Image: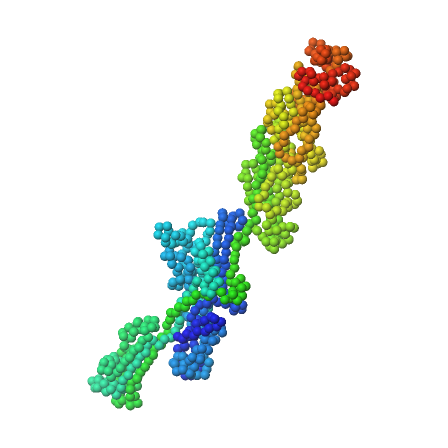
Amino acid sequence: MEEFVVTDAGNSYRLFYLPDVMNPALNEAGEPMWFYWMMNEVRIARDPVSSDYKFHLTKFAGVTSESTHVGVEGDEEVAGGVLSVTTTGAPPIEILQKSQQQLIEKFSGRDERYWGIASNATPQFSPIPLASSYTAISNLSPTASEVTPTGGDAPEDRSLITGPPVPEVRMSRRNGSLRLGEARSSRSNLDKWYARLEGGGKASIDPAGENAFTGLLGSYVTAILWDGFHDAYAPVSVRRDVELMVWSPQIQLTMNGEWSRIFSHFSAAAQSRTFFSSKAIQAEWENLVVKGDIQVHLIIDGTAPDSEEMLEMVRDHQEVIFESFMSQAKEVIFEPPPKVEPAEAKGGIFGFGGGWSVKGQLDTRFVELNYTETIDRKYRLPHSVSSSLKGFYNEINADPEAADKYFSNLYLDDYFRKVTRLVSPVVNWPSESEDQIGDPVEYASCQIGYPDTNGEMQWTGTKFYSHDDAEWTPAFSKKSEDEVQNPPEGWTSDKTYVKRRIGMLEPKGENDSPYIRQFVEKEIIELDEGENGTLTNDIDLEVRADSAGKLEIGPMFLNVMLENNRQFVEVTIKPAGETDEGNERNPTRFSFQFSDQDTPRYLELYTGQMDFVPEYEYKVRCVERGTFSQIGREWEGPWVREVGNGPIMISVPNPESSEPRLLSMEESAIPPEEVGSDKEAVDIEVTAPDGATKPGSTASQPGSSTNEPQNHSTTSDGQEAAMKPRSRHSHSNVDASETEASGERTYAELKTIGGWGTARPE
C-alpha cells in the first residue's frame, strides 16, 4: 500500500494505492499494469454541475398555538434544526490525476515485483473493490454515561443513535448524572440535545460512492453545528469502515538439497523393495529432512487475516511440503514401475499419489533441488477512514452570499397558520323579572366567510341563545393572495367577511310595566350591510345588540323630590327621526308619583338603522291634585332636546317659571293618569260678591245640587268669591280686561288665599 498526498489551494488530499496481483505478468508481457486507489479521508461531496457542496443546515424555531396554527393543541414552543450532508470518498478529478502522476514518476524503471513499471505502456487506474462498507457519524448528544458517542461499531439500523425517538435527557438531583428517561409532554416536543441522523450503517461499496445523512436535531446540537460549520472545521466527524478485496502472498515455501545425495538415499532403500508407495516415499523424505540432506523453509505472513490458522494448517498437513518435493522428484529420480498397478496411497493437497520406482541412473541434468513457491490468497482486508468534516469558513469569506446556499433560518410560526376569529355576543339577555330590563333578543347570529382557491366564498356560522356558551372560534387555513384565483375585491389573506344578525323578540307592552318601555321596529336586524357583509382583519368580533340602531335612555330620575302623594310628574318622550317606512316615531309617557319616584325608568328603541343617531325630545307635565279644601293645579315645561344614550336626570319645571292652571274640585279628583285627558274638565274663575254669580251657585256645574257644599273662598275684604266652571282648554290665567269688567280676582290677589300655593300673574 502506497499513500500519496496532493495539495491544492491550501487543501490536502490523501490517497493510497494497491497494485494488481498480476502486475508481474502484465509487466513482463508489456501490457499496462493496473493500480487501485482509494481516498484515505472522507469529505463533503460536491454537485458535479454547480460544484456546490451537498450540504444544508436549517435552523428552525416556532411558537404556535391552537388558535393560530393548524394541527396544534394548546401552546407549543419548539427549536432545533435539520441537517442534510452527503459524504464521499471520491477525490476531485484533478487531484486524482495528480496522485496518479506521482505514482508513475515514483515507480517507473524500478525493479519491484508488483510496483515497478518496466514497460512503456501507460498504467491503468481503478477504485479499489470493496467487499463491504459501513459509515457512522459522530453523535453530539449526551448519553446516560455522560459521554458523547463517536460512532462505535457500525450501527445496524443506519441511524446516529438507537432507541426510541425523542428521548428525554435529564439531570438526577441525587448524583448529578445524566440519565435517559421516557419522553414526557411539555411545551416543546423536541429535546434540546436530541440528534438522530438517518444514513449510517451499510453504505456503498464503491470507494467513490456517496453516503447521505439527514436528520433532526435539538436546539443545542443545532447551535453547535451552526457555529462549527461556519468555521474551518465542524465538531463532527465521519468514519468509514470498509473491507478491501486483496490478494496477498501469504505462504512462501523453499526447499534446497543435492539430488545426488537424495538419489543415493532412495537407491539404498530400493534394494529391499521393487517400488515405493507415496507413503513410503514421504517417510524417506522425512528422513532426508531430519538428516539435513533436504532443507525446508516455510514463511507465512503474520499480518494477514487468519495467518495463525494457516500456520496450524501447514503444521498439521505436511503433505503440502512433501508434494512440492514430489513434483520435482518424479522427473529426477523416480519413474512409474512397468506393468505394475499403482498402490493406493493418500494423495497430497496437490493431487499426487500412486506407486513409483527409483530410476536405474540419476538424471545428471538436475544437480540441486531448488524449489520456491508462493501461495497467493484472496481475502478481505479491514480498513477504516475517519475525518472531521470541513466547514465553510473559506467559502463564506470569499463569497458572503455562499452562506445562503448552505444555511437557512425557518420560522415555523409562519407556516400552517389559521385565520381565526373569536366571536361572542354582547347581549343583555331578557330577564324573567319584571323589574329588571333586558334586550328583547331571541338570538344573535354570525357568519364568517373566507374564499377558497377559486375565489368562491366559504361560509360558516352559528347562533347564540341566552342559554348557550357565549363564544365561538371559527378558523380557516390561511392562504396567500397568489393562491386564490379571482379573489374578492379588497381581500387579503388575513381578512374575513362577517355577517352579523340580531333576531328580536316581541317586546313588552307599554302597560306591562310602568317603568320600562321597549319598542322594536324590525324583527330581524342585519348589522353588516352588503352581500358578503363587512371585510375585516379583526380577530375579536362582537355581535352587539346595541349596534342595532338603539336608543337607550335610562335610568331616568327626576331632579326634584315629590313631597306627598298629591304630586305627580308626567314625562313624554318622543324619539327623533323616522322609521324605515317614513313615519315619525310615536311618543311614549312615564309617570312619577311620590311612592315610586326613586324607581328608575327606562326607554329602549331598536330601530335596526345602522346610521341611527340617539336623539330625542322630552316634555314634563306637573300635576298637584287638590282636596275638598284646596284647589289643585298643573303646569308643564317646554320640549327639551337631548342627544345620546345613557342615564338622564329629568328637569322638572317649577311653577314660578311656568303658568300654573288651577284645577276644579272634579278635576282634582280625577286620577292622576286621567289628568289632562280628553274628559270634560272645569277651571275655576273667581268673581266679586256683587257679580252675576252668587255664592253657592252651581247652575253651570253638571250634576250639582243645592244641598252640595259650595266651592268658595274669601276675598281680602271679607266677602266671599264664588267659583264657576270654565273649559279646561281655556288658558288658566284670566286677562286684565275680563278681570276689570267682572271684578274677578287676579293671581296676585290669589297669592293670599291659603292652601293655593303661589301663582305668577301674566
Query: Based on the displayed image, in which of its 4 quarters is residue 106 positioned?
Result: bottom left
Q: Is residue 564 left or right of residue 122?
A: right
Q: Position of residue 573 (x, y in %)?
A: 67, 30
Asked whether 748 or 699 is in front, the reply is 748
Seen from this angle, which residue lies furthest top? 707
User: Can the viewer see residue 716?
Assistant: yes
Closer to the camera, 15 or 19?
Answer: 15
Q: Residue at x 54, y 53 (%)?
A: 414
Residue 421 is drawn in which quadrant? top right
**673 or 253: which is nearer to us?**
673
Q: Residue at x 76, y 11 (%)?
A: 690
The quarter of the rendered structure image containing the N terminus is bottom left
Most extreme residue toward the left, as rendered?
Answer: 272
Q: Is residue 427 above or below residue 179?
A: above
Residue at 39 percent of width and 77 percent of height = 21
Above or below, 259 against 376 in this view is: below
Q: Position of residue 263 (x, y in %)?
A: 25, 86
Quadrant position of the C terminus in the picture: top right
Mark yes or no: residue 666 visible: no
- Against 661, is 363 above or below? below
What colouring style does the render use? rainbow
The image shows residue 336 at horizontal and vertical percentages of 28, 85
